[in-house]
Image (cartoon, helix red, strand yellow):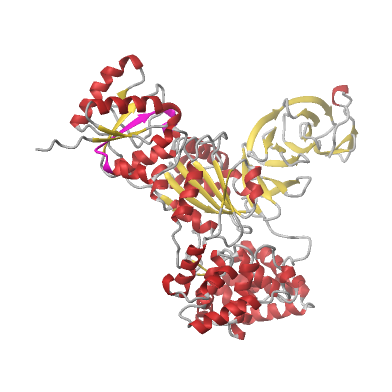
């Protein structure tokens, strides 16, 4: 009679602090008749998830988990543990390092202690008893599946092409060890249309990745024009990761709780379509078991934030043929002979293949040949100066698809040039742009989606255009000056039409009234007015702010009067002060609120900003001033010394000195770094305002006097004023 096969054991360990014990256990278990397996590739410095790991885990009767700090922060180890626990395999935790954290998903009351080498033999015998007795850790119910939350859903992808090698390469970058930065940040960069969003979304759906981040995976879309509420995003991330929101009642508390919460989590945060480092910085928090991944066209952003780089590659020829076949509804092995040449003309770019494949759907061989000929002859000379470089293969496919549309449909597509980046166009706005009824607008939108000339937007039930598609239709617009004015009008109206798309016609007509002398503006306004839902209110006079003027956009976010604002030297950052007791930091170019600064007990009465935009000092009715790190939103210190409301503040250009004015009838000069008063000047009445001018300090008081002062201090001669 054949003897039974030895029990298989899988040893899960981290190379940097668990390898020695893992090898000793392997040797001793073999001597006792077991069949132990460990990932020997890991011993030589590898840190990737392999098929061998999966097979060994699934065949194992028992999994021994070596608990060390290295395994606590390792995505590979977490994924091994969760795969075994979720499959019901007997998991036995072994504490291999004293004072190490134990993952919550293990929650073992009785782990075996291998921290003392002198006790190894005794603990090994206890371990053998656990194996024979099938003593296993239990998996808490909340870790049975990893929650995945899309705060802003990525566009739905038709004809999805699986790319396991690309997902595996991105996963290896995500899991890479030897992260020297306190925040593990990965930048996936690549040209537009290459499929970065699709690949990142596939990563979030990968089972190995989901097991590595049991607390949750959260997806956020940044975008070039989309207005984001960072504080609300923090709340939503916390909610998605299971945190109690009762402590998220103020912006400052929200930021503090978010960072405290993230420090304890094993989570993956994905930020898609990043255009500047300010899109991601507020969400970054030190977390040894979490990862932050962002996608971008601009590889330099990754360098600025010290991110690990991962380049998104083009499809290989076989994948490109498969994707073309999916869109054209032709099996790969039955693609016509012209397919390879069409793939080459498309540059193996997924977005280009989807456009041309949609055009070829169910077409005969003659049409394929004709399409290839059109691609070869596609003439972009009339618009190429308006198009970004490096994307010619894509624009050629769009040109061919565009030319295949009927004349009326071409005009409808060109009219989408007025949309902003990342702007969703619900059916109501499409009605007004195209001057058609709702059903016809929905039909036209579907044709464009089917042709892969637009993307379906699940939230608005309308469409949106990829940035490259916008580049193409904007290049077709006959009057770029007029187009810029329309874009300006939409930006000025964004806070209105986002809430109520039916206001689109009223807003556009009203804001463009001063520019009716431009024929393109007049035609756009008339067409939009004809398509407006009835009844509607048509502005007759130019009472709304018009584009092209001094007002570029409206920044909304405060809940009470705004009493002060300061601008950085390069004009890119603004900080506003409000009677709602907060300050807000803004990206001036996009109008995006970056963060809220909270800490004052009463109304904030003023703010000053250093020339480099990194340091802000605020004044308040709570008798104090506060110094802030603008980049992080962190309060650095409080300047105390006034005895009544502080109503004015100014900051030297180098940020070293501040001057304040107060109703306590004094003007004070401060050393910002030390938080100390340098000098005080007493007025006869309340001081209201102050400023640095050249080498002097100027202050105004309630009696109508203007005081010109100079700081006489040899240590601080040569103030760099602003």
Q: Is residue 66 magenta?
A: yes
Q: Residue 55 at x, y = what percent?
A: 32, 45
Quadrant position of the C terminus in the picture: top right
The correct choice, above or below, for 344 with respect to 185 in the image is below
* 156 relative position to 528: left or right: left
Query: Is residue 235 shown in magenta?
Result: no
Q: Quadrant of residue 387?
A: bottom right
- Please identify the quadrant where the N terminus is shown: top left
**The quarter of the displayed image where residue 672 is located:** top right
Question: In the picture shown, does residue 222 fall above or below 10?
Answer: below
Give the x, y percent position of residue 298.
65, 52
Residue in view at x 36 percent, y 43 percent: 52
Residue in the picture at 58% in, 79% down = 535
Residue 710 at what x, y percent from top left?
Answer: 90, 30
**In-front residue for pair 348/492:** 348
Q: Is residue 462 visible?
A: yes
Q: Which residue range is magenta in the image?
A: 59-72
């Amino acid at each position: 009679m054949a003897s039974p096969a030895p029990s298989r054991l899988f040893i899960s360990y981290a190379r940097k602090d668990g390898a020695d014990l893992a090898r000793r256990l392997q040797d001793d278990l073999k001597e006792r008749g077991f069949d132990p397996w460990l990932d020997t590739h890991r011993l030589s410095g590898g840190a990737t998830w392999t098929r061998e790991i999966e097979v060994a885990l699934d065949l194992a009767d028992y999994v021994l988990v070596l608990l060390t700090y290295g395994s606590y922060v390792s995505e590979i180890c977490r994924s091994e543990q969760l795969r075994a626990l979720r499959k019901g395999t007997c998991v036995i935790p072994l504490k291999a390092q004293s004072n190490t954290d134990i993952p919550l998903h293990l929650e073992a009351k009785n782990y075996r202690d291998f921290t003392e080498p002198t006790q190894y033999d005794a603990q090994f015998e206890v371990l053998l008893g656990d194996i024979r007795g099938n003593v296993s850790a239990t998996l808490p119910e909340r870790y049975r599946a990893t929650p995945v939350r899309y705060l802003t859903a990525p566009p739905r992808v038709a004809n999805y092409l699986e790319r396991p090698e690309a997902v595996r390469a991105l996963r290896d970058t995500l899991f890479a060890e030897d992260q020297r930065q306190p925040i593990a940040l990965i930048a996936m960069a690549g040209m537009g249309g290459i499929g970065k969003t699709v690949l990142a979304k596939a990563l979030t759906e990968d089972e190995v990745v989901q097991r590595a981040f049991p607390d949750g995976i959260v997806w956020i879309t940044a975008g070039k024009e989309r207005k984001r509420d960072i504080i609300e995003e923090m709340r939503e991330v916390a909610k998605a990761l299971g945190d109690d929101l009762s402590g998220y009642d103020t912006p400052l508390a929200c930021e503090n709780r978010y960072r405290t919460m993230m420090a304890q989590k094993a989570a993956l945060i994905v930020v898609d379509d990043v255009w500047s480092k300010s899109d991601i910085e507020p969400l970054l928090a030190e977390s040894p078991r979490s990862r932050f991944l962002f996608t971008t066209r601009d590889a330099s952003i990754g360098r600025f934030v010290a991110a690990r780089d991962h380049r998104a590659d083009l499809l290989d020829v076989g994948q490109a043929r498969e994707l073309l076949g999916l869109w054209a509804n032709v099996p790969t092995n039955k693609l016509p002979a012209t397919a390879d040449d069409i793939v080459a003309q498309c540059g193996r770019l997924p977005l280009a293949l989807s456009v041309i494949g949609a055009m070829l759907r169910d077409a005969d061989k003659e049409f394929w040949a004709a399409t290839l000929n059109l691609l070869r002859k596609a003439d972009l000379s009339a618009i190429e100066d308006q198009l970004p470089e490096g994307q010619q293969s894509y624009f050629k496919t769009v040109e061919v698809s565009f030319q295949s549309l009927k004349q009326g449909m071409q005009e409808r597509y060109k009219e989408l040039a007025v949309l902003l980046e990342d702007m969703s166009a619900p059916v109501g706005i499409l009605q007004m742009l195209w001057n058609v009824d709702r059903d016809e607008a929905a039909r036209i939108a579907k044709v464009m989606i089917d042709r892969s000339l637009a993307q379906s937007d699940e939230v608005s039930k309308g469409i949106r255009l990829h940035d490259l598609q916008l580049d193409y239709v904007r290049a077709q617009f006959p009057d770029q000056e007029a187009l810029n004015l329309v874009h300006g009008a939409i930006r000025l109206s964004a806070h209105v039409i986002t809430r109520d798309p039916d206001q689109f016609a009223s807003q556009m007509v009203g804001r463009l009234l001063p520019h009716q002398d431009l024929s393109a503006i007049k035609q756009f306004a008339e067409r939009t007015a004809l398509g407006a839902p009835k009844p509607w209110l048509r502005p007759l006079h130019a009472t709304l702010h018009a584009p092209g003027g001094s007002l570029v956009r409206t920044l909304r976010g405060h809940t009470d009067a705004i009493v002060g604002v300061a601008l950085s030297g390069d004009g890119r950052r603004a900080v506003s002060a409000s009677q709602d007791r907060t300050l807000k930091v803004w990206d001036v170019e996009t109008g995006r609120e970056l963060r809220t600064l909270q800490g004052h007990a009463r109304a904030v009465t003023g703010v000053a900003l250093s020339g480099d935009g990194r340091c802000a000092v605020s004044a308040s009715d709570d008798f104090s001033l506060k110094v802030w790190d603008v980049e992080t939103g962190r309060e650095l210190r409080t300047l105390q010394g006034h005895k009544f409301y502080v109503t004015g503040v100014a900051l030297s250009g180098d940020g070293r000195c501040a001057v304040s004015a107060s109703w306590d009838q004094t003007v004070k000069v401060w050393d910002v770094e030390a938080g100390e008063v340098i000098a005080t000047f007493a007025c006869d009445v309340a001081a209201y305002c102050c400023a640095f001018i050249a080498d002097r300090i100027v202050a105004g008081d309630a009696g109508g006097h203007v005081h010109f002062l100079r700081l006489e201090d040899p240590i601080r001669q040569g103030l760099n004023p602003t």
